[in-house]
Amino acid sequence: MDDSRKDIHTAGVPRICQACEARHKGICGGMEPEQLLELSRSTKIRTVPVGTELLIEGETSGTFSNILSGVVKLSKLMADGRHQIVGLQFAPDFVGRPFSDESLVAAEAATDVTICTFPRDALEDMTSRSPGLGKMLLSQSLAELDEARDWMLTLGQRTAEERVAHFLHTIAAHIDPYRKDDDESTVDIELPLSRADIADFLGLTIETVSRQFTRLRNQGVIEKLDGRNIRIPSLDALREIAER
């Protein structure tokens, strides 16, 4: 192709990054083409199966990752040995905490997850030289803080029905990061957590979670498919319950 006809958004961008939609919304959106090229030399894309540990609480990881697809659950170890789920991450979220000696949470693949990994020292060095990358990392950190505050509201003030609806809406809204915001067509999702994990995450009993699923199904807000697969006929209807 003639250089004059090259897309300005892909000119100079490494081949491994050109087909990656995550780079537009993730931290890579703050990098110049030459920085992407530099990082791509040590980048690996891999798919890890459900249950794989990506971060271990209290330990330092030698790599960071961008989530390209799938769901990652974050958890904290409690004094009695139990693990409390404290958050979920989706594409194109960033897994890891730059410039920190250790991870304050554990990260585990809640589904099969495709990630783009790169060495810790390479990214931290690049961040020190790139205001744009530092801004993107800060932006993601602030977004996570906002989500944590919203989740505090969910656990502290919302009813059981609203909590379950909010959880389902979160999954539906994030499972496809490239979905248009105004696209309210039917959404099919696969729940990334078991009923027990959902109950743990929402601060409810398994029985209560099951009752709320049945209630939403009877209202026509969700439809049971098979296994963990659920159909949501209208995100608007689900959001109305979640935000009452």
Image: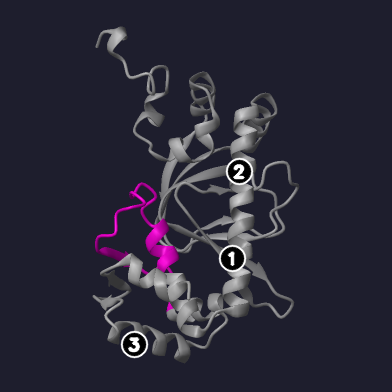
Q: Which mark is residue 150?
A: 1
What's the distance in space between the residues labelled 1 and 3, CA to CA? 25 Å
Percent x, y of residue 133 = 60, 32
Quadrant of residue 6 in the image? top left
Image-based side of 217 in relation to 47, left or right: left
Image spot of residue 203 (x, y percent): 57, 81
Q: CA distance from mark 3 to mark 2?
A: 38 Å
Along the line of sight, which residue is nearer the eye, 35 or 24? 24
Give the CA distance from mark 2 to mark 1. Answer: 17 Å
Q: Earlier in the sequence, mark 2 or mark 1?
A: 2
Instruction: Give the residue at x 43% y 62%.
Output: 50
Image quadrant where residue 54 sits: bottom right
Kind of residue indicated by mark 1: Asp
**Dot 2: within a 10 Å radius of its alpha carbon, few (fewer than 14), some, or many (20 or more) residues?**
some
Q: Nearer the viewer, mark 1 or mark 3?
A: 1
Q: Quadrant of the N terminus?
A: top left
Q: Position of residue 227 (x, y in %)?
A: 29, 76
> Residue 139: which numbered mark, if any?
2
Q: Secondary structure at mark 3?
A: helix
* Above-or-below relation of 124 to 243: above
Q: Earlier in the sequence, mark 3 or mark 2?
A: 2
The numbered mark at residue 214 is 3
Give how far across and how far down residue 170 sits, in percent: 45, 64
The first of marks 1 and 3 along the sequence is 1
Check whether the beta carbons of the residues at disc 2 and disc 1 lie within 8 A of each other: no
Name the residue at 48% across, 72% down. Answer: 243
Instruction: State yes or no: residue 176 in magenta.
Output: yes
| Residue neighbourhood size for the residue with mark 3, other residues' Cα within 10 Å, grouped as few (<14), some (14–19), many (≥20) | some
Q: Is residue 215 magenta?
A: no
